Amino acid sequence: MPTAVAVDKLVKKFGTFTAVNGVSFNVAQGEVFGFLGPNGSGKSTTIRMLCGLLLPTSGTATVAGFDVRREPEKIKANMGYMPQLFSLYQDLTVAENIEFYGGMYAVPRALIVERLSYLSERLELGVVLDRFTGTLSTGWRQRLALATTIIHKPPLLFLDEPTSGVDPITRRLFWEVIDDLANDGATIFVTTHVMDEAEHCTRLAMMHYGDLIVEGAPAQLRQDIVRNMVEVRATPLWNALEALEHAPEVVEAALFGDAMHAEVHEDIADPEATVRIALERAGVQVEQVERVLPTMEDVFVSLARRHEPADRAGRKG
């Protein structure tokens, strides 16, 4: 597939602080590319450089075939960008905001009317079209932000945590729209902290402390990153968690609903027996220990723990 985004050793420094530390990756045309990472890991800074909003300190990147240093205005004309912070005009109605952004992207008036009708139906905005934007709840604002981002049908979309703060119905609607756009050939570059959403992506990359630490398809990462995952049901649960956190055989343990997930060192042949013995040694009543497939949340937590260098403990991004 043709390359939509090509990044090579991209760096962004703010004074002595390095927010993005020489990252390299490619995004193919038509991909839904998930960009993951804890808060402050450098995701938004990377996106702003790719959108032509921040000048890189060093390194190179092309977006839709245009250089981020020399041709930022051409990039902006060929992409849509939905930032984390809501930035639409609060004293305009929903319909007026959509129409305004259509005009900003030089969409012909007749096509704006057509697109407004389509987006109103697809994002279920009909009941709020005449309401002032400043009166909307978070969910409606996010729907409107997405509508203004795609009013001109850009071939490339940057969506920075588009479902932050929205309800499950709106989240599902967003991903239905994203899937539709990808099926029509658009390239989607999306950040999220909701690990279930990461499963919708063709490929994932994870940032941590400004570094890109892993990339691959969701199924590949679940298979390669966490090999020995067990689910534990025990009483009392908090005592079980404390016992596993101190067990040398366990890499990571965390609550998972009314149970726990524990990652055991991959060289241990029988992780279920190992965990059961550790719990019984701590006087915990074990109800069930079974091997399970890791979730994307398990992968995310495991990677973050592994790449927490002591010399960067106070670093922000």
Image (spheres, grey):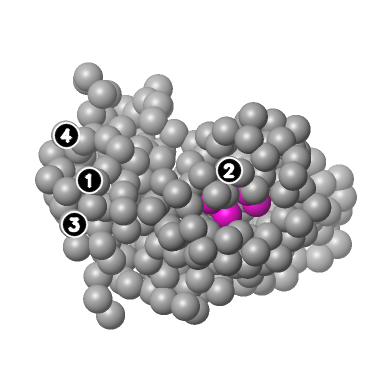
Is residue 77 on the magenta stretch? no
**Residue 41 vertical placement versus 29 (above, below):** above
Give the amino acid at mark 1.
Pro
User: Is residue 34 shown left or right of residue 42?
Assistant: right
Q: Inspect this view and state whether residue 212 appears.
A: yes
- Between the residue at mark 3 and the residue at mark 2, the CA separation in whole angstroms equals 28 Å
Which residue is the site of mark 1?
72
Task: Determine contact: label 3, label 1, CB under 8 Å.
Answer: yes
Which residue is the site of mark 2?
97
Tell me which segment is drawn in magenta. Answer: 143-148
Along the line of sight, which residue is nearer the eye, 152 or 71? 152
User: Is residue 276 shown left or right of residue 185?
Assistant: right
- Between the residue at mark 4 and the residue at mark 3, the CA separation in whole angstroms equals 18 Å
Along the line of sight, which residue is nearer the eye, 59 or 305? 59
Specify which label sits upstream in the sequence, 2 or 1. Answer: 1
Q: Nearest to the eye among marks 3 and 2: give it.
A: 2
Residue at point 43%, 60% (across, down): 108
Task: Determine contact: label 4, label 1, CB under 8 Å.
Answer: no
Residue 33 x %, y %: 42, 63
Query: For the residue labelled by badge 1, is the local secondary structure a helix, a strand or a loop?
Result: helix
Query: For the residue labelled by badge 4, is the local secondary structure a helix, a strand or a loop?
Result: loop
Which residue is the site of mark 3?
66
Task: Determine contact: label 4, label 3, CB under 8 Å.
Answer: no
Q: Nearest to the eye among marks 2 and 1: give it.
A: 2
Which residue is the site of mark 4?
57
Residue 243 x %, y %: 70, 44
Question: Dot 2: within a 10 Å radius of its alpha carbon, few (fewer than 14), some, or many (20 or more) residues?
Answer: many
Give the amino acid at mark 4.
Thr
